[in-house]
Amino acid sequence: MSGTQVDVRPRLGRLARGAKAEIIGLDESGIVTALPAGELERRLIEMGLIEGARIEVLHEGFPRRDPIAVRVNDHTVALRRSEANAVIVHLLPEEAP
Amino acid sequence: MADDKIAPRVALVGNPNSGKTAVFNALTGARQKVANYAGVTVEKKEGLFVSPAGTRVKVLDLPGTYSLRARSPDEEVTRDVMLGRMDGEAIPDAIVFVADATNLRLNLRLVLELKKLGRPIILALNMMDAAEKQGLEVDAAELSAELGIPVVPTIAIQSGGVAALLAQIDRTIQVAEVEGWGLTQAECGWSEPSSHDLRDYHREVERVLACAVQSPARPHTATLRLDKVLLHPAAGLAILLAVLFLMFQAVFAWARLPMELLDAGITLLKQGIDAALADGPIKSLLNDGVLAGVGSVVIFLPQILVLFFFIQMLEDTGYMARAAFLLDKLMGGVGLHGRAFIPLLSSFACAVPGIMAARTIENRTDRIATIMIAPLMTCSARLPVYTLLIAAFVPDKVVLGGWVGLPGLVMFGLYAAGILSGLIVAFVMKRTVLRGAREPLLMQLPAYRLPRIRNVALGLYDRGKAFLTRAGTTIFTLMVIVWVLGSYPLAPEGATEPAIRYSIAGAIGHALEPLLAPIGFNWQIALALVPGMAAREVAVGVLGTIYALSGSGDALKTSLAAALTASWSLPTALSLLAWYVFAPQCLATLGVVRRELNSRFWPAVMFVFLTTLAYGAAFITYRVAVAMVG
């Protein structure tokens, strides 16, 4: 969190179980990863984590609620919170029961 | 149809968990063989079938992948075969893309990527039965028109479920024969897609889906419900532990009877040879070399089959991915990937299949870390040694308020010591030589499916065959070498000590003795460790031979355990147990590490660090025990 412009948009890695959201962008800058630049973004896209996809956090691991299992359109993807932070989301309101 | 025509080759490609192997089994039945690609150790599954029109077709089952940008050694095979970069592999003539119909998005993206290769593609919408139950309505004709490739529904697990696919393969062959395969000239338009290209593919997939899918599949409700329990942070981990416990029980309990039968069979064979042949080198080679050596390895076949039965069931049901999910954070504490769970689990049967299972780990450093600690998981070959020493030196007392037997507790302690030291080694390695962030997890959690007996049986058949082939080739060779070392030169006339004492192995044992004296090993142990290089459990057999031959008539009558109790001190026995927790002396393990990592450096590192740990642990154990016992 440095620089003048801090991106305050919510990230998938911060969402709690039950949260629903739509993906509005991918940004892997600032994510610590063993992958070469641009690779994490491509892998996320290949797993269906792409702009416009509707997601819901279904499960949280143990300990520290990590990793998370996310419903993405028609399938479920497991990923760690650190990498999920590359996914910028727009929270959707809770549906009426 | 001329018989001398070269059979067209079809490659099966698809995402993981799309039922590709089921389609392969449905097409080929048992007419399949598993080999290795030249230079790499990824399994190559190839089969043969005759199409309805009478053409012989070769099928290649390629490892599942999400893209042609390879991430793991498995996926590299798929890429290299499809791009014609694999040595000794011609580019397949046509592609059958097996897609999970309930989950078309990710599959269709790869189809678009594959179309760039310029080969004919047939899209098989697999698991159509499940998809229809989930409310999917897809217009195959529309899908075919939008994608520009033929589309056929398949239900690979049902008899006749691939009929439409077979008919389409015939049509594709017909077209190709009229127009010429023309494939060698076909321009391969594939290049590694950028994130921009990938987004374009996705937009195209969304457009195609909007045209062809009238009603999307609902989520698999049983899977959602099961996951609520099986992925629960507390209940899920408890269930995983219970599954593992059951698996271990089964590996030992279910395999006991067949192992006893195998043992009896080998003994009968030995007696038969004993009666039929005169004493001499040939009889000794057959009995002491081949049967004693190869037999002591083949006897583990039942355990390996039971273990692989469980692993196959866990994989086919879709539970394996959940296990990796549940354990990822816990294993991350020592720097291991969640996927390291499967290789480490297999290593309790034998480190060799365990190390081979590490191929699914994409990142090389993660993979090396997993491979390096695999031999610290107590393999079943160490059991005979543990059992013998515990029977000889641990009193059969009940401890902890009458609940636990002391022998069982010691056995548990030995297993725990292996696991714990493995975790410590991984922790240290990931912070020193193998530094770097862990590979991302990014893994699909597939819908739960009932495993099919046929697929499980074919999988087990492959495993069993591979294991026996290895026992019949590599281990056989090693055993013959060990036998030669242990038999020559022959004992001189009027020798007072066992013949093995005068052999090359005996000389090695004696040369090693001063090195091993500080940890309390006598020359008999030093000698037993030499053939133990080939297979750990052989050490027990060698000790048996030495003590049977070196004692007078009395020693022959008593059991080996009793002979050891009489001639070894307790510190020596404890020291040997500590040594075997690390047991560096297994040629098969070192060999497979060399092959899998394609390096001489890592097996050398493994040998040195395991020997150091074994020596250190045995030294401390011996000294402490001597100080306490006096």
Image: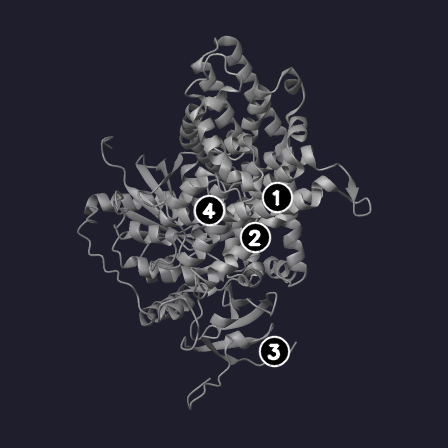
Quadrant where the N terminus of chain B lies? top left
Q: Residue B53, position in %: x, y? A: 32, 37
Helix, strand or loop for disc 3: loop
Measured Cα–Cα span from mark 3 to mark 4 = 48 Å
The answer for how far apart the CA atoms under marks 4 and 2 are is 18 Å
Q: Is residue B123 left or right of residue B628?
A: left
Query: Which residue corresponds to the image point at 44% horizontal and 40% vertical from the top-left?
Result: B25
Q: Is residue B23 left or right of residue B402?
A: left
Subunit that carries the residue with mark 4: B
Q: Viewer-proximal residue, B430 or B118? A: B430
Which element carries disc 4, helix, strand or loop?
helix
The x and y percentages for residue B74 are: 39, 51
Q: Amino acid at mark 4?
A: Ile
Are the residues under marks 2 and 3 on the same chain? no
Write down the residue under mark 3: A95
> What residue is pinned by disc 2?
B421
Please say if the residues under marks 4 and 1 sit with CB atoms less than 8 Å apart.
no
Residue B622: which numbered mark, if any? 1
Mark 1 element type = helix
Instruction: State whether discs 4 and 2 lie on one chain.
Output: yes
* Earlier residue among tags 4 and 2: 4
